[in-house]
Every structure is written in structure tokens, then in C-alpha cells.
Amino acid sequence: MTPTIEVLDLQVTFLTSEGPVNAVNGVNFELYQGEILALVGESGSGKTVTSLALTQLLEAGRSQVAGSVKFGGLDLLKASQRDLRAVRATEIAYIFQDPISSLYPARTVGSQLVEILTVNAGLNAREARTRSIDLLRRVGIPGPERQMRAYPHQLSGGMCQRVMIAMALAVNPRVLIADEATSSLDVSIQAQILELIKDVASEYGMAVIFVTHDLGVVAGTADRVAVMYGGEVVESGQVRDLLRNPHHPYTQALIKSAPNARDESQTELVGIPGSLETRREFAKIRCQFAPRCSESFEICWSHWPRPVQVEKSHSVSCWLLSDEEEILATQVDEGLTS
Amino acid sequence: MPTAMESGPLLEVEHLCVTFSARKGSFGPRLALKAVDGVSLEVASGDVVGLVGESGSGKTTTARSILGLQKPDRGSVLFEGREIQSLSGPDLRALRKRIQLIPQDAIGSLNPRRTVRQTISEGLQVHKLVPKESRQERVDELLADVGLAPEFADRYPEELSGGQIRRVCIARALSMGPSLIVADEPTAGLDVSVQAQILNLLQELRRRHQLSVLLISHDLSVVRYLCNKVAVMYFGRIVELGETRDLFSDPKHPYTRALLEAAPTVSAIGRGNELKGSIGGEVPSLAAPPAGCSFHPRCNQFHQGCDEISPELFELGGHRSVACLLYSDRSQ
Ligand SMILES: Nc1ncnc2c1ncn2[C@@H]1O[C@H](COP(=O)(O)OP(=O)(O)OP(=O)(O)O)[C@@H](O)[C@H]1O
Ligand SMILES: Nc1ncnc2c1ncn2[C@@H]1O[C@H](COP(=O)(O)OP(=O)(O)OP(=O)(O)O)[C@@H](O)[C@H]1O
Ligand SMILES: [Mg+2]
Ligand SMILES: [Mg+2]
């Protein structure tokens, strides 16, 4: 089976007044029809930038993007603006991380939905209106007929988020990119929305990139998980496998620091000491997590850890998983070539 | 400062009501939408009170009224015993410093033309909180507190990730050294390790400086970890109130029970790849509020009277109150 979308060696650098900021550094992943891939990782690790880069949504003058994104015979990173617009209109839909500012403040929710349905999905005005109301109902907006006339500021934060979700699902996209799409929803409505996304994914074969910080949501929703740190994917695998048996020290720490609603004994939360650094260089010269890793050793600081397959489709980039020989060989190798 | 008030709660919200208006149909009659309907709650010094509840239940509207950003049509908000509506001039300015909001719409609250440093030092400057020469240092310190390196100080909001923006808002609130923080979904979208850092920081400020927090969050694990009291809101009303431990271990109101059961957990993978279900039924519309108890159409313990009588909060003892006929009946 060919993947719906295939990302190869994606790199993103921002040009700022303080010099370049390297936000994404060689990300690879593929996504198949109907599959839900969770993208998790520390704040600032590059999840949003990765997802925006896929359809060239980053401001061109201030960022440089390299690599390739294969989608339906196109390389989206080289595609024309016209092709990109078509792809964004009907094939790859986004739910942006900040829903309130992503809606037009001066237009009603209904007119924004109807426009998408008439312009992008080719419905007539009547059909579009009926379908809009139905979509609002499916995302759990009470009194959808009335809320068609509401402006975004008249909705709660979670309602805005759900309107965004309705807009994204309106066109039956082939790929849905949901960035923290349920971050301001209560658990009950969240469950309803996740079920809806899962249904659409399995029914219409929609592939989903699900960016979230909530490992509970990952556990209940995703098929696969990719864990990002410092602009790289450091571990990826099937969801059960990865959550039950995490190998990368960062993934292990991430799972350990999750607070638990059902655990009374929790009196202190263990964070991960230190903070994510800004990368200024492109080269893969060491493990990004080394400065905060309690298990780092010499080679972590001098060589980049290549992904190692620990199980079928579970791969980890960490020197702890390589044996002495391999490490020595790497050091010698690199010594010779440099 | 009036000394007589020192023993009273820091914040006292009494019977707060906020009504929005809308039209029925394009030309129809005006409708009154009761977004907040008689909310009362107290936050004592050093208290961290959680406000949880369904999306659209009126949490943000309550928070905005407490800050004086939304005019209530009834009820009062007392801060240290003084009605905030009546404050003006220097008193109001002082209040603005002592109560800080961490807004739900983080990015919308930041001026896109100002760097992180300008945003955070604004309050320090206006209220002359630190001498000019140590302002830079203080900003760096606040950034470190929320896990951001000093280099972020010179970035503009659009150059930050979602979680970084949220943390700038937290640092801005902390910069004023407030006595009360009203935090509206402060950890939404923050990964667990950054979240742990923020929660531990708030915990420490509370222990050391008696900081009080009204924490609005949909994340029940965060609430359980940080709050000593919890108020559960449904459809504009508080339906249950109690000490965190009691409320989590023995939820009384059918809505609270359903809410706690719906929380996803990491350990859920042990029991198959299934999410806990959502609460059945449809969330009622403010334009057509159900008669009687507003939860009755979705309640699995519905019984006679629930669709007629709208129950008031009823004290069960042990600092627990519940607005549900199941309990007020039993006591009679
Ligand atoms: N326009 C920009 N200019 C400079 N740096 C940027 C820009 N946009 C993002 N960054 C930086 O790139 C890094 C990755 O950002 P990204 O938004 O992808 O993070 P994220 O993983 O989505 O985090 P979060 O969970 O907080 O949303 C961050 O450190 C951020 O500060
Ligand atoms: N300016 C307004 N005009 C009309 N209705 C409004 C206005 N502001 C809020 N509302 C309505 O009031 C209700 C409560 O909104 P509020 O933002 O307080 O909810 P919330 O509990 O914070 O929800 P969430 O968890 O989704 O943020 C919602 O039904 C919303 O549509
Ligand atoms: Mg992001
Ligand atoms: Mg809100």
C-alpha cells in the first residue's frame, strides 16, 4: 500500500533577528489511509511547524523549508501556489492550535461554514446551510440553528474549537491535521469529538495527524505515535507498544510526568529538569536530549544517534540501544571521514 | 487595608448572574441567554479552587466577571470585602495588580507588536515593582520560572509555539506578584513536563506567599493535583462544591460522576484501545433551557420532580454542597 502522505527529511529554519532558528531537523514519517498518527513532544519541539510546513503554510520570506512531502503524485514543497490552494481547500484540512484567532471575528460562524461548503465542496446555498447545521450538531454545539448566526466572540473557547473542527471536516478531507484540537474541551465533549474523528477516519479513510500533549488521548485515539524532541522524531511506533514499552529516555520521562486523575497518591509531579534549547545549527552532531538526559554518556555528546529498530515498526534514536561494537564502529567511521 | 476583613475570604462571589441577549431568527424577538445563573463561590487566602465543567457552561464568563471585564446583571464580587464594581481610580489600579488573569485565548491577549520582554516588563514598569536597572533581570527570572530561556525575551508572539505563548501569559501574570490568579485553562496544550513545572511553581507560590488561585481547567488530573477545593459547573450553575479529595473519591451529583468517569487515562491502554464514552444526550441550548434541573434530560438518575424543580445548592456537611434533588430529598 502506498502512503497517503510521505514526509522525507523535512527541515525548517526561521530567519530571526538573532540569527537562524532551526525548528525542524530531518523529520521523516509516512501516513496511510485511515490511520491516526499522534505527534507528541515538548512544547517548542516542532510539532506545529512540522504540520504547517507540509502544505507550505509558513511565511516564505522568514523561513526556509527543505526535504519533500509526497502527496498524490505531488511534492507539496515544490508544488505551485495553485496546486497548493486546491490541496488545502479540499484534501488536507487543518484544525489550528489557536482556534479563537483562526476564525474571522467579523463574520458569523454560519457564513464561514457555508462558504467552505459552497466554494470548496460545491454545494448550493440551501444544501450548505443544512449541512452546516448538521456539522455543528455533530460537534456538539447546542442550538446549532441559532449558533449559525453567532460571531466567534459570542462562543466559548471550546465552542470555537469545535467550530474549527466542523469546518475542517466539512470537505471530507483525505488528510486531517489536528493541532491540539481538543485542548480546551471537557472530557465528555472531547470523547465525543474523538469518536467523531475516529469514525470519519475509518469510514472515509481519512488519515489524521493528531498533535496532542495528552497521553490519555493518544492511548485512546491513535494507531501510531511519533515523539518529537528538539525538531527531530526520537521515537516512533505502534501506540500500545510505545506507551507500554518506551525506550527513549525522553519518552520514558514524558510518560512518567503525566499527572493522573485517578491517582490520589500523587503529591509531586516529576518534570524533566532543564529546558529545550533553541537550535541554531543544522548539522546532526549529537543527541539533542543529551543535556537533560540522566543516562547520557560520552558518545551522546559527540555523535548523532541514528534510528534503531527495536521491534517491527518501533524505532528509537538513542545511543543506549546500540552495543559497544556499533558505537566504536561509528566513532571510527566518523573519525576517518572527517 | 481594612484589618477587619483579614479573616474573611479573599474573594467572595455571590449570586452572580450574567445574561447575554440574542435574537430568535433574523427578525425574531429578543432572547435572554443566561450564561451564568446565580454562581456563588469563595476563595480564601492560600486556596486553590478548581472550576470545572462542560464546554460552554459559563466558566470564562464567571472569570471575566470576577476581573470586572464582564458586567454581571446581578450579584456581587467582593475582593477583600470590597465590591469590585464600586472601585475606581487608584483603588481599581491596585486591584488590577492584585488579581491577575491568565486568559484562555492566550495569543489573542498578546500585542503582536511587542516583544516578550516588553509584554512582561510593562506591568513591572507601570506599577514600579522593581527598579529600572533590575527590570531585565526580573524578566529573565520570570521566563526561567516558566521554562523559557532568556533568548525568548526578544521574540515576537508569532515567533513562538503555542505552549510558549501560554507560558508568556503565565509569566506576565506572575510578574505583578498578585494575591489572586484567575487562570483560565492555563495548561491547555502544554506537554506534561512543562505542565509539571508550571504546577509545581504555582504550588510553591501558594506555600510560600499564600497565593490564591481560581483554576479553570478541563484537565481533571491537573485539578486533582493542584486544587484543595473544586466547584463543578453545569449550564451556568454550580452543581457541586467540595474538598478535592472528597469530591474525587465520592462524587455526589450525577453530572460530576459522569464527568469523572469520562476522563481518559494513559493506563486505559491496558484495557483495550477504547476511550471512555461521553455523557449521553445533548447539551441543552441556552435559548431553550430545560425546565427543572438543567441536567435532567441527560441524567441517569432522573426521577419524579427533576423536570419541575430546579434544585438549589444544598449543604451536605463536610464542606460539601450539591444541587440535586436526590440529596435534598433524603435529608427531609
Ligand atoms: N516564526 C518563527 N520564528 C522563529 N522561531 C519560531 C517561529 N515559529 C516557531 N518558532 C520556534 O520553533 C520551535 C518549534 O515551534 P512549534 O510551534 O513547532 O512547537 P510545538 O512543538 O508546536 O510546541 P507547542 O506544543 O508549544 O505548541 C519553537 O521553539 C518556536 O519558538
Ligand atoms: N458575548 C457573548 N454573547 C452571547 N453569548 C455569549 C457571549 N459570551 C459567551 N456567551 C455564551 O455563554 C456561554 C458560556 O460561555 P463561556 O465562555 O463562559 O463558557 P466556558 O465554560 O468558558 O466554556 P469553554 O470551556 O468552552 O471555554 C456559551 O454558551 C457562550 O456561547
Ligand atoms: Mg504547537
Ligand atoms: Mg472558557
Image (cartoon, coloured by chain):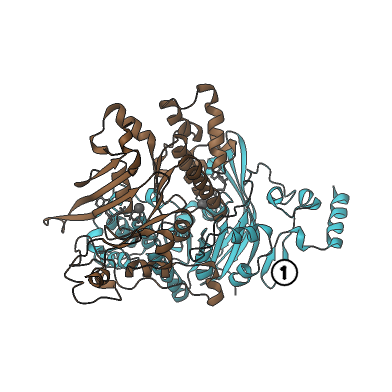
Chain colours: A cyan, B brown
Please count the marks in the image: 1
Q: Amino acid at mark 1?
A: Val
**Point 64% across, 49% down: residue:** A273
* Residue B226 drawn at (x, y percent): 47, 53
Q: Which quadrant of the view contains residue A146? A: bottom left
Is B111 located above or below residue B199 in the figure?
above
User: Foreground: B309 or B141?
Assistant: B309
Q: Which quadrant of the view contains residue B323? A: bottom left
Q: Would residue B154 be visible to someone looking at this image?
A: no
Is B40 located above or below residue A139 in the figure?
above
Q: Is mark 1 within 8 Å of ligand 1?
A: no
* Residue B15 drawn at (x, y percent): 23, 51
In the image, is A119 to the left or to the right of B125? left
Q: Residues within 10 Å of mark 1 (few under 14, many from 20)?
A: few
User: Residue under mark 1: which chain is it in?
Assistant: A
In the image, is B241 to the left or to the right of A220? left
Q: Residue under circle 1?
A: A310
On-image quarter of the N terminus of chain B: top left
* Residue B37 drawn at (x, y percent): 22, 55
Q: Would residue B286 be visible to someone looking at this image?
A: yes
Does dot 1 land on a helix, a strand or a loop?
Answer: strand
In the image, is B145 to the left or to the right of B107? right
